[in-house]
Image (cartoon, rainbow, N blue to C red):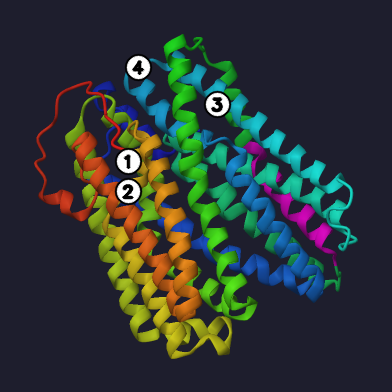
Amino acid sequence: MEDHDNRVRHERGPETAMRMSIAGLARSGAVAGVIKLASAGLSFLMFVVVAMVTDERQFGLYSATYAGASLVSFFASVGQQSTVLRFWPQYAEGHDLRSAHGLMGYAIAVAFAGVAATSLLVVGLGLAPYIGARTPEWTPLCLSAAILSFALGWSEFASGAFRAKGALVSGLLPRDVVWRAGVIALVLGMHFFGVVVSAVAATLLTAGVLLAAVLPQTVMLLADTFRAERGPLSKAQKDEFKSVTLGLWGATSLPPALGQVSTLLVAGILGSEIAGAVFVADRTTRLVVLALTGINQALAPEISGAFYSGDKAHVQRTTSFTALGACVVALMILTVFWFFGTFILSIFEPAYGTPTMHAVLMIFGLGATVAAACGPMELLLQLTGLQHSLLKLLVVVNVFGLAVTALVTWLFGPVGAALGTAATVATWNVIGVVIATRSIGINPSVLGLLADRRSGRQNFAPRGVL
């Protein structure tokens, strides 16, 4: 299961088993960034080719089913992909592999129960009377969505488990690249032979390929876990696991879910056509935080391992340099948007290439740039015992932000929607940096480069501030 970077770490000796240099972190982040960029491109192409083998109505049903399954999957794994990233490096750093493997077995059971239970709820929704009566395909669509949500939730957990063990590439490739490439290849073959498929068939195909892509990963994870010597978790460890899980579940599920709610809010106020343009602009600006997203994939075990061994200086150094690199890349991409934003938007739809939508793109980009400058704030709070503070922050800021976004969208149209959304993103990131700085003495933003890098006292306990 180990990637090259992980093997190198173990060859250095136990005292540095969970440490990676800034250069090594940058290399791993670059690799993860390339994978995430490929994932974004393949995701777009996957929807294009599915549209080729479905008619307009069936593709609309497929898109809605996929979105619904994705929304369910955000909550399905009960936050276990972050829980293993939080605890595995902590136990491994302390050379307590019996507890680490015991924790992994516990997380596997919780994640599987979560994805199975949520899938059954979707099945129940499909079988319920009266609901979806206007859609003849309602029941089979719900059944196929249940399979897809199971596959999405489980694959997200498996990816997190591999990354927790340092297997970055093999953790990301199945879900981010192999799955989408497989769907594209199969659908292109169907298109070549003139096959027209329904939304149900397309959803089942998507789910089936994903399950096949993560099957080797699943077999390896289960074999490694259940063949290893596992120690039962103590009562204190179980209590900590349960407490952390609840916070991480909300903190990892709310941001993507609220993103879906924001899109629906704009659609309800402005109509589907304008909402489509705003959606495209919003998703395009995800490129601004691509570097941060990539580095975060490699950074999580570093933060957990160093923090719980008392090496606060290493956490400060890696997070602030991550923020610097992410901010530089964000500013470069924002510059590209300034000069070529109208052209980029018109690629999706010529009607999107207007000065108004260019302004929307730039506003979204500014909000994302602030998030990049704040560095891996969310990851730091999740992995250092401040997950409940992060959850409260997300709930408070986003509830207020959605209300403000609704008002300014109604008053100023798509520009108002962009202003409300970008301000919400910037606000929770800046406040999150303040919480981290006050609670654990680590500033994950670019300003952290100016902070005192002396190591704090060992084995300190972080305090919540919300």
- Callout 3 touching callout 4 (CB < 8 Å): no
Q: Amino acid at mark 3?
A: Ala
As drawn, 175 above or below 263:
above
Residue 158 located left or right of residue 113: left
Residue 9: x and y in percent read 32, 32
**Which quadrant would residue 328 be assigned to in this image?**
bottom left
Cα separation, mark 3 vs mark 4, equals: 19 Å
Cα separation, mark 4 vs mark 2, equals: 26 Å
Label 1: few (<14), some (14–19) or many (≥20) C-alpha neighbours in 10 Å: many
Residue 360: x and y in percent read 43, 78
Q: In this view of the protein, can residue 85 be seen by the observer?
A: yes
The stretch in magenta equals 197-216
The first of marks 3 and 4 along the sequence is 4
* Residue picked out by circle 2: 376
Label 2: few (<14), some (14–19) or many (≥20) C-alpha neighbours in 10 Å: many
* Residue picked out by circle 1: 380
**Which quadrant would residue 463 be assigned to in this image?**
top left
The first of marks 2 and 3 along the sequence is 3
Q: Amino acid at mark 1?
A: Leu
* Residue picked out by circle 3: 107
